[in-house]
Image (cartoon, rainbow, N blue to C red):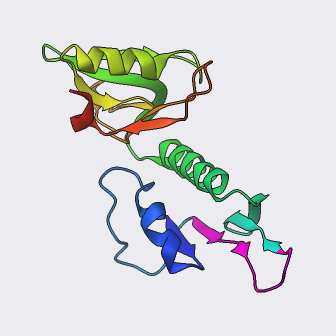
Amino acid sequence: VGVRVNERSVLGRVRALLPPGWKPAAKPTVRRLYSLIAGGPTNRAGVRRFNILYSDSERLLRTHDLEETLRQLELDLHLYIGDRAPRRTFVHAGVVGWNGQAIVIPGRSFSGKSSLVKALVQAGASYYSDEFAVLDERGRVHPYPIPLTMRPGRDGAPQMKYRAEELG
């Protein structure tokens, strides 16, 4: 997978969205190329440029909201990797380790997986992921430690991201 941006200021934020263990490609060719064109203000009064996200030649999103653009990039990137991972099966689930075993918590989005994972980690479990259970051919679970994300609650509190070390 390749990701390119038109604004250097966005590059650090994009790198933070890349999957765990990513490395720069050794070859210049990639199977999927994401292009993020960052918009924002212009020199012309009352004019704002759109943020546009492409996957290869397909436009995924066009919006004035950079945060929405980055969320869409992160979602599509992780789904693409999960769908094409060799010798691994990705299941939409939260995962923690407990006493040498994995606890896999499958569920739909907004079903409470992340809240349960956070509570288990605070109780002493090891954080693996709140998004994907990554299984190999032998049924072993592997970590996919993207930051745990708590979406806004009913009280409208903002979305929060936690790294594993912040939870315990």
Instruction: Evaluate whether residue 30 shows in this view.
Output: no
Horizontal arrangement in the rendering, residue 8 relative to residue 108 (left or right) = left
> At x 80% / y 72%, what residue is drawn?
48
Horizontal arrangement in the rendering, residue 39 relative to residue 142 (left or right) = right
Front residue of this view, candidates 88 and 112:
112
Residue occupying the far left of the picture: 99
**Quarter location, residue 140:** top left
In the picture shown, does residue 57 fall above or below 125?
below
Residue occupying the far bottom of the picture: 43
Magenta residue check for 45 = yes
Magenta part of the chain: 32-47
In the picture shown, does residue 17 fall above or below 151?
below
- Residue 9 in the image, given as x and y percentages of width and height: 50, 75
Magenta residue check for 42 = yes
- Residue 21 in the image, given as x and y percentages of width and height: 29, 54
**Quarter location, residue 38:** bottom right
Instruction: Evaluate whether residue 73 shows in this view.
Output: yes
In the picture shown, does residue 161 fall above or below 3?
above
- Residue 131 in the image, given as x and y percentages of width and height: 45, 32
> At x 42% / y 67%, what residue is drawn?
12
The C terminus is located in which quarter? top left
> At x 28% / y 21%, what residue is drawn?
96
Front residue of this view, candidates 29 and 70:
70
- Residue 24 in the image, given as x and y percentages of width and height: 35, 71
Front residue of this view, candidates 125 and 24:
125
